[in-house]
Image: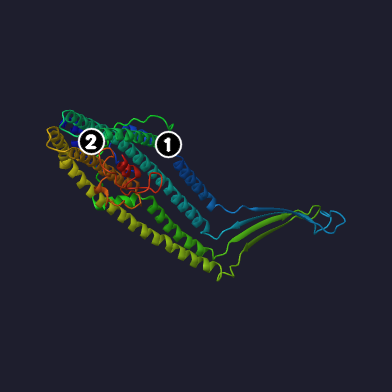
Amino acid sequence: MLALLSPLAAPAQEDTRTPSTQASSAPVLPEDPALAQLLAEALETRPELHQAEAQARAARERVPQAGALPDPTLQLGIQNDGFTGLMIGEMEGSYFSIMASQALPFPGKRALRTELAELGATAASTQVVRARLSVEAEVHRGYLDLLLVRERLLLLERLQTLWKQSADMARIRYETGEGAQSDLLRAQLELNRLRQRRLALQAEERIRVQTLNRLSGRPLEAPLPTTMRLRDVGVPELGDSEAAVRDALERSPELAERHTLVARAGKQVALARLERLPDFTVSAGVMPRGGDFPPMWQANVGFNLPIFSGRKQNRAVAESRAQAMAPTHATETLEQVLRLRVQERLIALAALRDTAAIYRDGLLMQSAATVESTLTQYRVGRASFASVLEANTGIIRDEEEYLRTLVEAQRLAIAQAEVSLEPVASMGGSSQGAGGMPGAGSTPSAPASGAAPAGSAPGAAASSSSSSMSGM
């Protein structure tokens, strides 16, 4: 019996490597060739990333356009005396005309427009960073979900072995007249229920595989072997509070975009001030008159008169100043939210680390010992079958809770690597458990609360897969 329960009671030690705060996405899972290949393929094939890159290229193409001069104007004309015939060369006032004009913005306007376009391109490039972080986080979460469902299948096999042993004991006791027939029937009932759960888990496994295959651009039904066990993942480290906050502030695409928008708003105010100054138009032309008449030429310089600046240009400056305050306040708000999210993750991760230590250092071993003792006592008639039922339920429930603790801890690390703005899911129900597996003799409780699934708002701290352990 101890040989059977030892995989449950002796999980691997935690991996406490600290993620790098300088990488585009901190390594939240141990090195795994399968995961590394999925990440590389996803970053190469995801249309969301290509869309963001295309938009960033389009924004960069607007930079030279913003600083270019307006197109010059070429005019061709004719002036003739009278309507009876073409009088060019015969009359002094008749001639052909070739005129060219060029608008010239007031000095400094082109440079400011170029800077505005460059800042716009910089803001667009932050969307590429966000798309990359989101794709990486989505793959990490999907891989974690796949590891979880496969771990649950292994748990189901172990639970099935426990119930087979329990059923054998109930049969022996019934045949010898020492036990009730209801004990044997209940054990057989639980075994049949486990077959039903296996079908559901196998279907869920296919869904997780297809999700990861979609993310990496593979055929949906392509096999996806994993080389890592969920219990090998351990509880990650996010570093100290100051380092984690600094990392989030440095790598947040949203905050970088806000800083860019603040700088852009300042340039917009400066440009609005310059718009009160007149632009110029330079034109020149030549008028050949033919015959013995010498050609004529002309040159002109014109400029617009901002006589309505009180209602137009001055109001535009006031508008730009008011608009410049919005990104400034938005930046302050975002910094506060980022600091809050990091602190939430650190607090939650500390609680999960302590919880995992309780499971690893004592609770799982105690559950295994309880199962062995209860089965031994039932064999000799000193314990009821209800005690066997409770013991089998308890060890699987404890193992599920330990796995869920690891999953939730990794999701926090994934959210930190993604620089997510999503709040940490409530941990109030995590210790209540999933209620154990149906088939272990318990009634499943409501799933624990979780954040949005992969592909929606980035950085969810828990997904439906971790919550759905209650439905095993």
**In this rendering, would 350 be left or right of 83?**
left
Q: Of the two numbered discs 2 and 1 on the same chain, state the one appearing first in sequence.
A: 2
Residue type, numbered disc 2: Ser
Name the kind of residue labelled 1 in the image.
Arg
* In this rendering, position of residue 287 left or right of residue 28: right
Which residue is found at the position 31% from the left and 53% from the top? 341
Residue 340 x %, y % = 30, 56
Residue 457 in picture, x, y percent from top left: 39, 49
Q: Is residue 21 visible from the viewing direction of this image? A: no
Depth order, front residue of 294/256: 256
Task: Locate residue 83 relative to residue 1 in the image: left or right.
Answer: right
Asked if residue 227 is positioned above or below residue 136 in the image, the reply reads above
Measuring 61% from the left and 57% from the top, which residue is drawn there? Answer: 103
Mark 1 residue crowding within 10 angstroms, few (<14) / some (14–19) / many (20+)? some
Spatial distance from mark 2 to mark 1, Cα to Cα? 48 Å
Relative depth, front residue between 250 and 302: 250
Of 276 and 156, which appears nearest the observer? 156
* SS assignment at label 1: helix
Disc ID at residue 182: 2
| Mark number displayed over residue 426 | none
Q: Quadrant of residue 105?
A: bottom right
Q: Residue at x 42, y 58 (%)?
A: 262
| Nearer to the camera, 397 or 439 | 439
In the rendered image, the residue lying farthest to the front is 177
Nearer mark to the viewer, of 2 and 1? 2
Identify the image quadrant of the C terminus.
top left
Residue displayed at 38% across by 45% down: 453
Q: What numbered label is drawn on residue 214?
A: 1
